[in-house]
Amino acid sequence: MKILHLNSNFVYTDIYRNLLDSQNPEIENIIFCPLKKKIEFKSDVYKVFSPVIIKKYHSILSKVRREKSFNYILKNNLLDGIDLIHAHTLTNDGILANKIFKKYKIPFVLTIRNTDVNFSLKYKKHVKKEYKEAIENASLLIFPNYSYKNKLKKFFENSHKICHKISHSPIIPNGIDDYWLQNKATTEKTLGKEINLLFIGRIYKDKNLHRILKAIHEINTLKINLNVIGKIQDEKYFNKLKKKHHFNYLGSMNRYEISEVMKMNDLFIMPSLNETFGLVFIESLTQNLPIIYTIHEGVYGYFDDSKYGVAVDPKNINDIAEAINYIVNNYSAFQSRLRNKEFINNFVWNNIGQKYSEIYRKINSEWKI
């Protein structure tokens, strides 16, 4: 089977390479990832086509970007022998896959992601008709979390056809690196006199670090330290927080360094305003760190609330403070529940790859009938 992946983010993250590596080796994968500027990227395993054909204004003029990409694909014969297309976002990849489908009847799978539900469908009203058509024509929709499935259904609540398709769509998470599976914590944690909270993520307003600090300030009964790991994306925002609040900024770290820091912390906290999935939450659970995460976003829905952590309203400072107190007051119960880590199997790349391979095989066989 030969699959063309329309993936505008392939060269920017290892997630997609991990996905392909975990699939049936008999599948031949071709990747199309158009760029705004040249990026040093090399793959000895996959055929990656990454032409510099995208302009900044294409974020508004989606049709122009689609036509440029479509013409490149035809000119370079990328459709030769293709059995199936996987569009990894609706925003750009999905409408391109739909154009190919309408002309060449090559079936496509469509993954719905953060930008699709939290930006494009809300603000790109001029492309709504094309988005709707792509969703209708996709052989299958895939969601990385429960949140986006619910949001898309609400957005198209007046379309019975789309709502029915969404209801029968699978939710498949991203996987965590094997490092975390091979180094799962086996010793239960206990609390000391001081509570150590850990935040790992890019530092800008959407990650909600300011409300975490305000919530900590509201808790007078505990001595709390906040340790922060991650790249500073907004210097002005970071400097403002440093002047107003006390926290320990540890800079950027690799996974080994992060796992060592996790051993010295008691819980993980990152109630972001928007979160596609958030692998760091699952990584934290492998290290016996209970988590505070965002309700209706990211990992929400993958396990019962209050089982391994607490879901909060990210805009409610009191809600965040209460979650911290709740985990501290019930810490031994959280540790007991974290003894059994079978739930981690849902986030193992090999298992995820098998699911995708089966989806591809099924759709391909249905179209070959």
Image: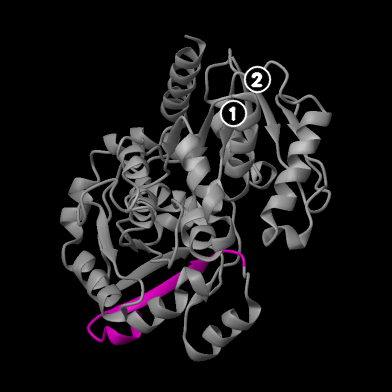
- In the image, which residues are magenta? 216-231
Instruction: Note whether residue 301 is visible.
Output: yes
Residue 266: image x %, image y %? 33, 62
Amino acid type at image mark 2: Ile
Q: Front-most of 152 and 272?
A: 152
Residue 322 location, quadrant: bottom left
Name the colour scheme.
one colour
Query: Do the numbered discs 1 and 2 sit on residues whose CB atoms are within 8 Å?
Result: yes
Residue 291 location, quadrant: bottom left
Q: Front-most of 241 and 206?
A: 206
180 on left or right of 319: right
Vertical placement of 55 versus 26: above or below?
below
Amino acid type at image mark 1: Ile
Q: Label 2 belongs to which residue?
A: 82
Residue 94: image x %, image y %? 57, 42
354 on left or right of 218: right
Residue 199: image x %, image y %? 45, 65
Q: Name the residue: 62% across, 70% down.
A: 232
Tag 2, which secondary structure? loop
